[in-house]
Image (tube, rainbow, N blue to C red):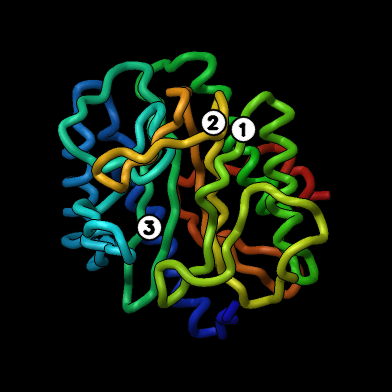
Amino acid sequence: MAITLKNAQDIEMMRVACRLASEVLDFITPHIRAGITTGELDRLCHEYMVKEQGTVPAPLNYQPPGYPPYPKATCISVNDVICHGIPGEKVLKHGDALNIDVTVIKDGYFGDTSRMFIVGEGSILAKRLTQVTFECMWLGIRQVKPGAHLGDIGHAIQVHAEAQGYSVVREYCGHGIGQVFHEDPQILHYGRPGTGLELKAGMIFTIEPMINAGKRDIRTMPDQWTVKTRDRSLSAQWEHTVLVTDTGYDVLTVSAGTPKPPEFITQATAA
């Protein structure tokens, strides 16, 4: 696999693109409420990207081989949708759990991030799954440093998810990113420690675990994009874009409204 190590200029450009992606999620947060459609949320995000930020929504018309062009600016995945939910006429209701996944292009560089949201109070399950998935992402991020291996990231995520009785989706993974939307390496969210590619300073990739409340099996809808849990159980996902530094990691997808890391991360950093 051809890994692109980013230089200082690349990293600064990526820092800008990633912050802008995160700011789209800051912008849309107050609009997430019962009664709004996912299509309207997408329209608002699209307008903000183009008119306010001067960014390009990377998913719009994105077409990997064998797929139809993706028709919207964001992916919005509600309840049992694991990923790639196409925004449309679905009306949000109290208790819905949704992931909004944003990738922007700024001056040729891609910034990619996603967050979970719960409409209104939400069920105990939705809140717990959302929190555990957030912790999984951060446990994966915490493994990142030169000399560590990709398997360390996946192992940390898998162990935490399965200890809570949840399952890890295996068909989709994190990915290298820079001036290309998806590049090597692939970041699996399961695995064995000490296996896989060795991390080096200058790598930039996403960590984006998809965790199901039920079994890990998936089903793809006729639109060829929307992926749901086969058993119709709830699914959750969080995503950050991460830089491998000389001493550890730097999370690039950070803005004023980014949720703070879990306490166990901040305590470990302070220690």
| Residue 224 x %, y % | 29, 47
Q: Amino acid at mark 1?
A: Ser
| Residue 198 x %, y % | 74, 71
Between the residue at mark 2 and the residue at mark 3, the CA separation in whole angstroms equals 25 Å
Name the foreground residue: 147 vs 53.
147
The 10 Å Cα crowd at callout 3, few under 14, some 14 to 19, many 20 or more, is: many
- Res. 207 image quadrant: bottom right
Query: Left or right: 205 with respect to 54?
Result: right
Q: Amino acid at mark 3?
A: Ala
| Residue found 53% across the figure and 14% down from its top | 124
Query: Left or right: 9 with respect to 74?
Result: right
Residues at discs 1 and 2 in contact (Cβ within 8 Å): yes
The label shown at residue 167 is 1
| Residue found 58% across the figure and 68% down from its top | 185
The label shown at residue 21 is 3
Query: Left or right: 271 with respect to 208?
Result: right
Mark earlier in primary sequence (1, 2): 1
Query: Left or right: 81 with respect to 142?
Result: left
- Res. 162 image quadrant: top right
Mark earlier in primary sequence (2, 3): 3
Q: Secondary structure at mark 3?
A: helix
Q: Is residue 175 placed above or below 39 in the rendered structure? A: below
Name the foreground residue: 211 vs 91.
211
| Residue found 31% across the figure and 47% down from its top | 225
| Residue 50 x %, y % | 19, 62
Residue holding disc 2: 212
Mark earlier in primary sequence (1, 3): 3
Between the residue at mark 1 and the residue at mark 3, the CA separation in whole angstroms equals 28 Å
Between the residue at mark 1 and the residue at mark 2, the CA separation in whole angstroms equals 5 Å
Q: Secondary structure at mark 1?
A: strand
Q: Is residue 15 placed above or below 122 in the rendered structure? A: below
